[in-house]
Image (cartoon, rainbow, N blue to C red):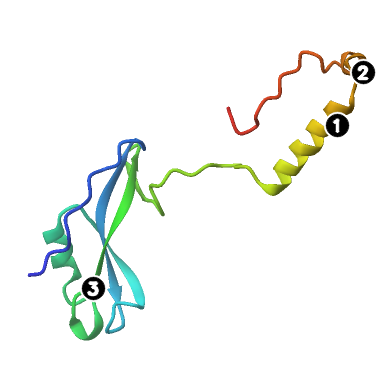
């Protein structure tokens, strides 16, 4: 019995993230065409047994290690456990900020006071 590799250690940052073996039924000699999901297991031995006769011509199905999020007693498969940045800097946002800074530099101190921009601190919208 060929066992899949052991599960990786859970990452330290995302709470409730662990790994499991996903077993898929396949229809192709290279496990390329996934026909259906068999299930998820934490034991490699159970995943191997579940994959038996689920592949091409009665061979084993495809076993993949996937990240799982456990939340309120339910488990969800994650696409990735890599942290992402939402609303990151973009050329549009950078251009807006550049235009704003250039416009503020053109104003005199009296004009900024009149507009209420004297003690205004620019808040980065990406920091919350």
Q: Position of residue 46 (x, y in %)?
A: 14, 60
Q: Please tell me which residue lies in front, 29 or 36.
A: 29
Q: Which residue is mark 3?
A: 61
2, above or below 88, in the image:
below
Q: Position of residue 109 (x, y in %)?
A: 88, 15
Task: Compute the Cα span from label 3 to label 1.
Answer: 62 Å
Dividing the picture into quadrants, the one containing residue 62 is bottom left
Q: Which residue is mark 1?
A: 103
Question: Dot 1: what SS?
Answer: helix
Quick one: quadrant of the C terminus? top right
Residue at the extreme left: 1
For label 2, the residue is 111
Q: Residue at x 84, y 27 (%)?
A: 105
Q: Position of residue 41 (x, y in %)?
A: 21, 56
The residues tagged by marks 1 and 2 sit, at their Cα atoms, a distance apart of 12 Å
Give the residue displayed 7% in from the left and 70% down from the top: 1
Q: CA distance from mark 3 to mark 2?
A: 71 Å
């Amino acid at each position: 019995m060929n066992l899949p590799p052991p599960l990786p250690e859970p990452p330290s940052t995302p709470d409730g993230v662990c790994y499991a073996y996903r077993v898929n039924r396949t229809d192709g000699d290279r496990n390329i065409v996934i026909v259906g999901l068999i299930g998820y297991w934490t034991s490699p031995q159970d995943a191997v047994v579940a994959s038996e006769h689920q592949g091409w011509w009665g061979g084993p199905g495809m076993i993949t290690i996937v990240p799982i999020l456990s939340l309120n007693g339910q488990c969800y498969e994650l696409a990735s456990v890599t942290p992402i940045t939402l609303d990151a800097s973009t050329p549009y946002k950078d251009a807006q900020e550049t235009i704003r800074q250039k416009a503020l530099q053109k104003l005199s101190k009296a004009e900024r006071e009149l507009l209420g921009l004297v003690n205004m601190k620019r808040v980065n919208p990406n920091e919350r």
